[in-house]
Amino acid sequence: MPCDLTVQIGTLTLGNPVIAASGCFGYGVEYADVVDLSLLGGVAVKGLFLAEREGHPPQRIVETPAGMLNAIGLQGIGVHRFIREKLPELRERRATVIVNICGSTLDEYVELARILSDADGVGALELNISCPNIKEGGITFGCSLNGTFDVVSAVRKATRLPIIPKLTPNVTDVASFARASEEAGADAVSLVNTFLAMAIDVETRRPKLSNIVGGLSGPAIRPIAVRMVYECRRAGKIPVVGMGGIASAADAIEFMIAGAYAVQVGTANFVDPFIWTWLVDGIRDYLQRHGIARVRDLTGTLDTTAREKEWTSS
Amino acid sequence: MPVDVEARVIANTRLSPDYNVISLAAPAIAAAAAPGQFVMVKLGHGSTPLLRRPFSVFEVLRTGRTVNGLTLLSKRIGVTTQMLFDAVEGDVVSCLGPLGRPYATIDPPAEAWMVAGGVGLAPFATLAEALCARGTSVTLFYGARTGRELFYLDWFRERGVRLVLATEDGSLGDRGRVTQPLERELQAAAGRDLMVYACGPEPMLAAVARVAATYHRASQVSVERVMGCGLGGCYSCVIPVRQDPTGRHYVRSCIAGPVFAGADVVWE
């Protein structure tokens, strides 16, 4: 039985629901030698400001139980160099490009959206309002319902590209942020960004990251992320792109059952840069095994009905 | 183009209570690797450790002309190096590589001076072989805490490499840092055409780059930073290099390095 793996986010059609997560895949071109970028549902490139940024001093990552902390500080080449130096190769490789944008001000988000709307080869914009590692901008929008509404509305007026606010889990009620995004005209929301966290070297009593605190990702956060995707799905109609510690097809399927239309994979790509084909194959196998013709029919199929306890004696 | 190989452990030789050399059946990587390149290694499929760890390719194993594997020189300091220390024949190590920019080799009649500190010996076995094969005269300046932690001395001697040793406890070679005999010999080498290669702890690399510059010598240093992916995806392994007009700029040591010109790095 052939399966339809395509997923729709606003006007953008993804060939399958598996997207490389922003901040974990460079600008995509770094991986062009090891992965056929056209086989990914999408490539969410590293967060871009208008200008180039240096990021935080090392040490920028530290491994923690079943996860890692990062405080990269959004080192990046800025939107103009991205369009000039990276976008042509992404186009040539037939990647579905989702550009993650970050601003210190509302005007910067709008400006970025305008510039990228005019660039050839951009499929959608992911609004980074959730990076826990920089003080200015971004997270200040993402931690306030009004701020989230305002930035999404402003970008909505500036572009016809699909817009996907990326939500932070570092709030009391993430679903209210999905609703605010929906009301402001977003096409989808993606979640979760990393959990603000910290690790200390007890011998030296020094923080393990130069930024002192950083964002936790990896399998350690997956159950919390699944719960948050579930809450957002129940709270509104807006499509949810789920992420947080996905390292296998079963993990991706878990997010989709909880309510995700598509998923993003970040930390697991560091461990296995060849993960993409077997994630997609694993999802296809699952759909066939369960007689599901279209991957979008899997979304939100969590079964919470009470059941007789079944047992067989054999 | 890097490949990911589930490499079987062929042998595991313990050199000391902390150091070991592990032989892996990864011929595709071994055949493609250039001196100074590295592999990203992971043992087991669990979450501890979660991330791969970078290791220089130490030796390329051959039977006649057939390449059958590579070795890694490891010092036991963390989870992965403990697992590499404990691994036995038949275990499987996931090995992604070869990665990174290698050392640039030089043509004779130039001399190559390799400066190694501790486990920083790792890239110099393959570099020595490559340089000796080109007829370059090779010297290894090799420092460690004690003589018991200076390894493979006969291996290098057999290949015609001149050894200059230094130990912090004075048990073998000069007492003190390896940069002392390096500086002494650089003073005496005026007019000779030579390239300095270094790998070891970062303060040693900074000292080598500084002393090489003092005597107007070019140096190539291999750095080791905390690395997440090895492919340029995560931006964790950055190192500051000189850049005009801003003065300095972070570059990813996995793809812009791990080998840099000593004069390009901003030592902190």
Image (spheres, rainbow, N blue to C red):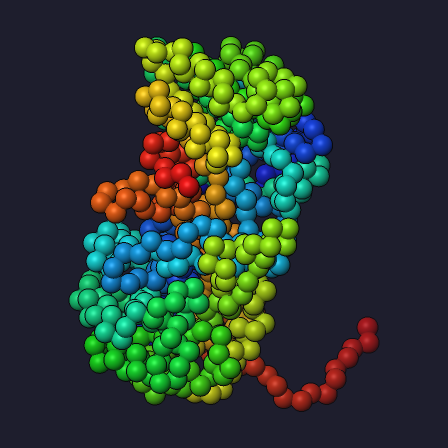
Q: Is residue A226 left or right of residue B149?
A: left
Q: Position of residue A202 (x, y in %)?
A: 63, 54
Q: Nearer the viewer, residue A41 or A88?
A: A88
Residue pictured at 53% horizontal, 73% vertical: A225
In the depicted view, which residue is nearer to us: B122 or A314? B122
Look at the picture and state if A50 lies above or below B229. below
Task: Looking at the picture, tell me which residue is in the foreground, B25 or B140.
Answer: B140
Q: In this rendering, is residue A227 above or below B86?
A: below
Q: Quadrant of residue B208?
A: top left
Residue sitting at x 62%, y 59%: A65
Q: Residue furthest left?
A: A118
At x 40% / y 29%, what residue is drawn?
A: B209
Residue at the (38%, 23%) spot, across then down: B212
Q: Is residue A35 left or right of residue A184?
A: right
Q: Is residue A106 above or below residue A307?
A: above
Q: Is residue A43 visible?
A: no
Q: Is residue A216 left or right of residue B216?
A: right
Quarter occupied by the C terminus of chain A: bottom right
Number of numbered tags placed on the structure image = 0
* Residue A181 place in picture, x, y as percent: 36, 82
Q: Position of residue A228 (x, y in %)?
A: 52, 78
Q: Is residue A186 visible?
A: yes
